[in-house]
Amino acid sequence: QVQLVESGGGLVQAGGSLRLSCYASTGGWSIGTMAWYRQGPGEQRELIASITRQAATVYADSVKGRFTISRDNAKNTVYLQMNSLKPEDTAVYFCNADLPGLRDYWGQGTQVTVSS
């Protein structure tokens, strides 16, 4: 059974930082690309950062230069370091992992709230 568990969300003031983590329990299946999405109130879920197994990264323009995605393949974990947070970063953040040969999987989400 594949399960993704996010942690690290919370309430922070504008300009502050948070670090999200997502651990993937895959039962031995290899993980391909991992990504972070977010969904603000009344908005669609959007891709904000992705990272391949070889550590190639892609960022949405809205977070480029402020957020950094990284991963530890030995720990099946992906991270999202979020700096210079803005109120518009408030959203539920979701982890996604692609398992080649299976499908992609989602975590349950973690709330990030940035106060002005």
Image (cartoon, helix red, strand yellow):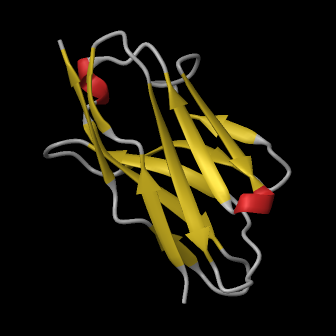
Q: Which quarter of the rendered picture does the N terminus lie within?
A: bottom right
Q: Is residue 13 above or below residue 41?
A: above
Q: Is residue 95 left or right of residue 50?
A: left
Q: Residue 71, percent across and down?
A: 70, 48
Considering every residue shown, the one lying at the far bottom of the view is: 1
Q: Residue 50, percent across and down?
A: 62, 47
| Foreground of the two, 46 or 19 | 19
| Foreground of the two, 50 or 14 | 14
| Foreground of the two, 89 or 80 | 80
Location of residue 100 (image quadrant): bottom right
Location of residue 26 (image quadrant): bottom right
Q: Who's the residue at 44% across and 56% down the image?
A: 6
Location of residue 88 (image quadrant): top left
Q: Is residue 60 something one can see in this rendering?
A: no
Q: Residue 8, percent across and down?
A: 41, 43
Q: Who's the residue at 59% across and 81% down the image?
A: 103
Q: Which quarter of the rendered picture does the C terminus lie within?
A: top left
Q: Who's the residue at 48% across and 18% down the image?
A: 83
Q: Residue 54, percent across and down?
A: 86, 51
